[in-house]
Amino acid sequence: MSVKIDITNHETGNRYEITNFISYDISQSLFIPADAFNFYFSNINGEISNIITSGDEVKCYIDGNLVLDGIIDDMNVSLSSDSSEIYINGRDKVGILMDNQLEPKTYSKIGLKDFINKMVSPYGFSKISVSSNPKIDKIQINAGDSVWDPIYNYCKDHNLYARYDIDTIVASYLKSTTDYDYVFSNVVKEGIKFQSIDILLSTASVKNKMIVYSDSYDSKNNIKSSATDSSLKIKRQAVQNEPDIESESQAATKAKQALNEANRESFKITLRMYTKNSIKINKIGRVYVPRIGLDAIMLVEEVNYQKSVDSGSITTVKLGLVEGVPVKWGIHDIPTLFYLR
């Protein structure tokens, strides 16, 4: 795997390419707002620290493919009698939106795409892609909210997940299909070979039933609904109140969303591999391990590319449940997430 970064100095506009790293760490996630990076490399005679600084733009490439476009948050220069190194870390450009706070304001009857555009255009973002563009009756901005907070939250209310993808603010559904993009296996002939696998099966927070009440529930306004995962042998219910629910259909949708969120962490697979392939998040992976009878369709939620002196270059892929796609593995009691569209 070849990794390089292009750094553009935000004061001079000069561009510099760096390919020789002591270590690096590039992390991408569906559920963490900003992708992150850190790089550690030699700084002989100040050759790097004299030309780059915090605030500079960084483009990260893996095997020639641009995987992250961000900004240096911190730069640390280390100097001793016989060596000099430099360490930089930062986030993709969602970090700009996370670091800026808003004054209170209310928006009424606005399309999601138009709302996102109003939020991000003052910060230089012009490309927006949404899988759905619902009209929202009311959006309330609270004092001190980051620019990113209402974007992420109102997208999530409509089963969309917001993120920054190179030069575009994207609000997309989680991929939900049995058609897989990757095959991960410990069998050489079956797709991408992994070196190790960790499987987490946790029942601590699993619920088989979620009941949702309107915040204004009383004898006159008795709006409530529930969602049940009938595939589970576990019997454990949760009850919660939700604001702004005006119908039973809204309550039913909220119940499915809440049950999905409660059960999403119940089954996770983490793979570690030496591979030249770059892996994309929000893609579908088939995890095939005949030795333990596992053949599961999973969602790629996180990818981490890492190089260290001790372990060399390794890719870590974390996968979770796919909405609407059950996982059958022996006797294990694994929730099935609702398909939300």
Image (spheres, helix red, strand yellow):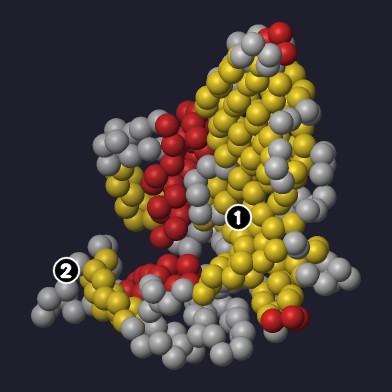
Secondary element at image label 1: strand
Number of other residues with Cα within 10 Å of mark 2, as a class: few under 14, some 14 to 19, many 20 or more: some
- The location of residue 175, given as percent across then percent down, is 62, 65
The answer to whether residue 67 is seen in the rendering is: no
Nearer the observer: mark 2 or 1; the answer is 1
| 79 vs 155, nearest the viewer | 79
Q: Which residue is mark 1?
A: 302
**x 32%, y 52%: residue:** 138
232 over 169 or under it: above or below: below
Task: Tell me where residue 143 sits by quadrant.
Answer: top left
The answer to whether residue 204 is seen in the rendering is: yes
| 209 vs 293, nearest the viewer | 293
Q: Which residue is mark 2?
A: 216
Task: Tell me where residue 271 sits by quadrant.
Answer: bottom right
Q: CA distance from mark 2 to mark 1?
A: 38 Å
**x 55%, y 35%: residue:** 91
User: In the figure, is residue 143 to the left or right of 296?
Assistant: left
User: In the figure, is residue 234 to the left or right of 19?
Assistant: left
Secondary element at image label 2: loop
User: In the figure, is residue 36 to the left or right of 158?
Assistant: right
Number of other residues with Cα within 10 Å of mark 1, as a class: few under 14, some 14 to 19, many 20 or more: many
Marker disc for residue 161: none
287 over 129 or under it: above or below: below
Task: Tell me where residue 27 sits by quadrant.
Answer: top right
**x 59%, y 70%: residue:** 199
What's the amino acid at mark 1?
Glu
- The location of residue 31, given as percent across then percent down, is 51, 54
275 over 216 or under it: above or below: above
Q: Earlier in the sequence, mark 2 or mark 1?
A: 2
| Residue at the limit of the structure toward the left, as seen here | 219
What's the amino acid at mark 2?
Ser
- The location of residue 57, given as percent across then percent down, is 63, 25
